[in-house]
Amino acid sequence: MSHAPSPAGPSKRTGPLATTVPGAASAPRSAREGSGRGGTALVTGASSGIGAAVAHRLAAEPGWRLALNGRDVTRLEQVATRAGAIALPADLTRPGAEREIAGLALDHLGRLDLLVADAAVGWAGEFTRMPHASIDEVVGVDLLATVHLVRAVLPHMVAAGSGRIVLIGSFAGTVGVRDEAVYSAAKAGLAVFADALRYELRRTGVGVSHVIPGVVDTPFFHRRGTPYTRSWPRPVPPERVADAVWSAVLHGRDEVYVPGWLRLPARVRGTAPGLYRRLAARYG
């Protein structure tokens, strides 16, 4: 239920493109994530929505240098220009793209203190009607591409003894949502991945944050082909999720719900799953 990157734009360029924006290299190279004094970050899904909001939120903090990834070249370069960042457009589901993007980000930034993995797509409807290609795309973008990118970035953070990975999940991955079976499954996989990775990285100096938005006011629903029509809960602006990302980075938080009240139904689901399922079946 969060943000989705735009499909490829009008540009015919297929490989990663590094676009250096004036001023992008002027921030301090020694800044570290988590200190509030700046650092270096790679943000995926940054063409629009949550990813773009995160880019602007980080750019507003002193000393941050950014590399942005997305599939819509035109929109990504516009966001990069406004954020004073480097644009690295590529489809992360393409084999080897994650290594190329990680390498380019490291080449331009010198190190990576922060990865914010936000790239996602959605599909809504009855599972029995979901095309095989859409199943592969949702799982490929929402789960596998992120796992592969973390695998490419993580050794550099561990070697440096510091860093943070922020995974943008979805409330759908916490409770499961009707007519979003595969999206819910992919986001649930991301949540468990965050937990397992956090245990593995204990004492390495690298942290893992899982930011869990509910409904967010982005082009996500339009792009999946099914608009959001419920009167409640109302969508929150992507800037609110970006603030949650910044809070997770600044304070080293493991898990952040946006809005915060979503933690309550999540707890009901965990402590009384039968009750939660009856309520969800009745009220949707």
Image: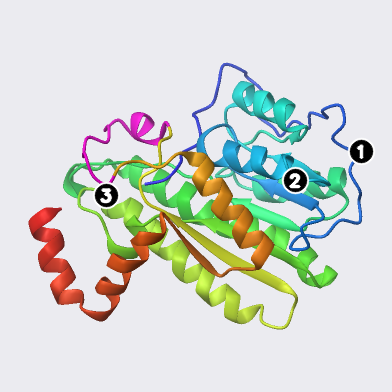
Q: Amino acid at mark 1?
A: Ser
| Residue receiving disc 3 | 180
Mark 2 surroundings within 10 Å by alpha-carbon count, few (fewer than 14), some (14 through 19), many (20 or more): some
Between marks 3 and 2 in the image, the one whose residue lies nearer the viewer: 2
Question: Dot 2: what SS?
Answer: loop
Main secondary structure type of the part rendered in magenta: loop
Q: Amino acid at mark 3?
A: Glu
Please tell me the numbered disc located at residue 26.
1
Q: Is residue 22 visible?
A: yes
Q: Quadrant of residue 69?
A: top right
Q: Is residue 91 visible?
A: no
What percent of the width, then of the height, locates residue 182? 31, 53
| Residue receiving disc 2 | 61
**Which color scheme did the rendering employ for the protein?**
rainbow
Between marks 1 and 3 in the image, the one whose residue lies nearer the viewer: 1
Q: Residue drawn at (24%, 43%), measured in percent from left and top?
A: 130
